[in-house]
Every structure is written in structure tokens, then in C-alpha cells.
Image (cartoon, rainbow, N blue to C red):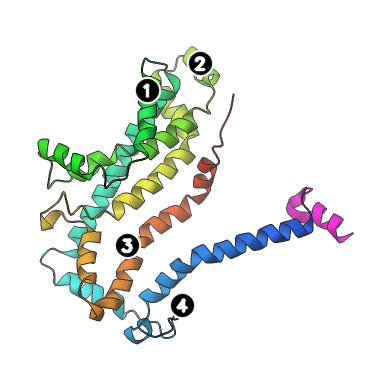
Amino acid sequence: MAKKKYKKLVGGRRLNRSFGGDTFIFTILIVFGIFFAYPLVYAINNAFKPLNELFIFPPRVFVRNPTLNNFQDLFIIMSKSWVTFSRYVFNTVFITVAGTVGLIIVASMGAFVVSKYQFPGAKVFFNLVIITLMFSGYVTAIPNYLIMAKLKWVDTYLSIIVPAFAMPMGFFLLKQFIDTIPDTLLEAAKIDGAKEWRIFLLIIMPMIKPAWLTVMIFSVQGLWNTRASNLIYSEQLKTLPYALSQIVMGGIARAGVGAAVGLFVMIVPLVMFILAQSNVLQTMANSGIKE
């Protein structure tokens, strides 16, 4: 009787699984959720721990005597730098925003053409993009540097922003999502007199919003955390993660500052993911309108 009542009440619909099956699944999800949330909770608590709690053994997850001294010390150290803290922040924000916007524009336009226009070599081009997914940034670092040096873009913002436009994962996700849009919808728009740009901006982009939001999260995470130390040498153009990494290298005395740095660097990608997590799940499920 309890099982029948459970099936009728949960979610307002009848469930196919048994009460025991659902309990088992939820238990597994909770265990894995705790497992994945542990590093985040630990990092947040470390940022507010005084030095005596940071070095206690065995280490404690939760802070006993929270303090803001770590953040105060961080800003004091940054204020003594001959390059202001705001300059480092501006460099990182500018590179992140410009690189992300450019990636979404370039990747979505390219994915639209490859997906909906059967031009010669389209499959070959897409296969090359898939192949590039196998290579990490470390493999392409030297060729990338040689290209930037040839273009005389070393020690400029362009050396970081322009390569970000060519993120193969972004192109792949957008192309796969655009494939789910029926061709009949685009043909109907053309019959109504819509031009290619109008179709792209008013039909394609709104319908693939979950996909480009997911790409945006990946791009922000990569660009926000980039140090760019191999391409940018001027201190005025250095990014915030590079400046913060130099602070952490100060030794044990700066362990608390290092914990604050870790939280400061991870907060932006974390907030981005929280705000767009539903779109990420939708993209990974490859949902959309299918013909």
C-alpha cells in the first residue's frame, strides 16, 4: 500500500522503479555529491582559517575560528606591488570576456555552416576538428608560440585572445546541437523572406542557447585561470592568476594568503557554472528539436 501511494505521489506521476530502487539511486547520488563537494567545502573553509588551523594535524574540514586576515594580507601584498591590483584584474577580465565572446561568435558561425551547408570538404573539416580534441594545450604550445611570434603578437593581448577562438570542444558541441535543428524550420524561414544572418541570429542562436552557454563556461574557466607566462612578459599585461601564483610562492608564512588566493581564483568559474548548470545538463544530454 505504501509503495502504491509512493508511486502516485512522487513528482505527481507514476514511477516505474520501486521505492527501494529509488532509495538506492538517491543514496548513491548523495554519496557521490558529498565526494565531489568535499574539495570545494575544504577550499572555502581553508580561506577563512588562521595559520594555526591550517597546519593542524589531522586536518579539519571546517574552520573553528573564522578570520578575514588571509584576505586582508592578500590585498596588502597586492597594494605594495608596483602594478596595481586593479590592473591585473582588468587584464584577466578583458582577456576572458574578449576570448569568450569571440569564441562563441566564431564557433557558432562555423558550426552553422558546417552543419547546414553541405559544401565540399565539410566532413573532412569536421573530422579534423574531432582529431584536434585529442591534443592538449601542452602539445600545441610550441606551434602556437611560433605562430604568435611570426604575427608579432607575443607580449600582447592578441596572443591569448585569438587562439581562444579556436577551441575545438566549443565548435564540436555547437555543431552537434545545431544538427538537431530541423532543416524544414530553416527552409520555412527562407520562404518567409528571412536572410542568412536573420536566420542565424533569430533562429539558430536562441535555439542553441544551452550549447553556447556551456561553451561560455568552459571558455571562462580556461581563460580566467590562464597565466600566459609563456606569451606575455610585460608586467603591465600580466594576468591575475600569474600575480597570485607569485604571492603563493612566498613560503609557509603565506599559506593563509595562498588559501585565499585559491578561493579568489575559483569563485568566478564556480558562479558561472551555478548560474548556467541547467543549460550544461541540457547540452550534455544533447537535447533539442529533432526532425
Q: Main secondary structure of the magenta part?
A: helix
Q: Nearer the viewer, mark 3 or mark 1?
A: 1
**Which residue, given by chain and number where applicable, does mark 3 sit on?**
265
Residue 224: x and y, percent? 30, 54
Placement of 4 over or under 168, stated as above or below: below
Nearest to N terminus: mark 3 or mark 1:
1
Residue count near mark 2 (Cα–Cα under 10 Å), binned few <14, some 14–19, many ≥20: few
Residue count near mark 4 (Cα–Cα under 10 Å), binned few <14, some 14–19, many ≥20: some
Q: Which residues are magenta?
A: 1-17
In depth, the one of 42 and 185 nearer the eye is 42
Which residue occupies 16% across, 37% down? 147
Which residue occupies 56% across, 33% down? 288
Q: Mark 1 and mark 4: span between their CA atoms? A: 51 Å
Residue 198: x and y, percent? 41, 23
**Which residue, given by chain and number where applicable, does mark 4 sit on?**
61
What label does residue 124 carry, if any?
1
**Which residue, given by chain and number where applicable, does mark 2 sit on?**
187
Q: Mark 2 and mark 4: span between their CA atoms? A: 58 Å
Tag 2: amino acid: Glu
Nearest to N terminus: mark 2 or mark 4:
4
Secondary structure of the residue carrying numbered label 1 = helix
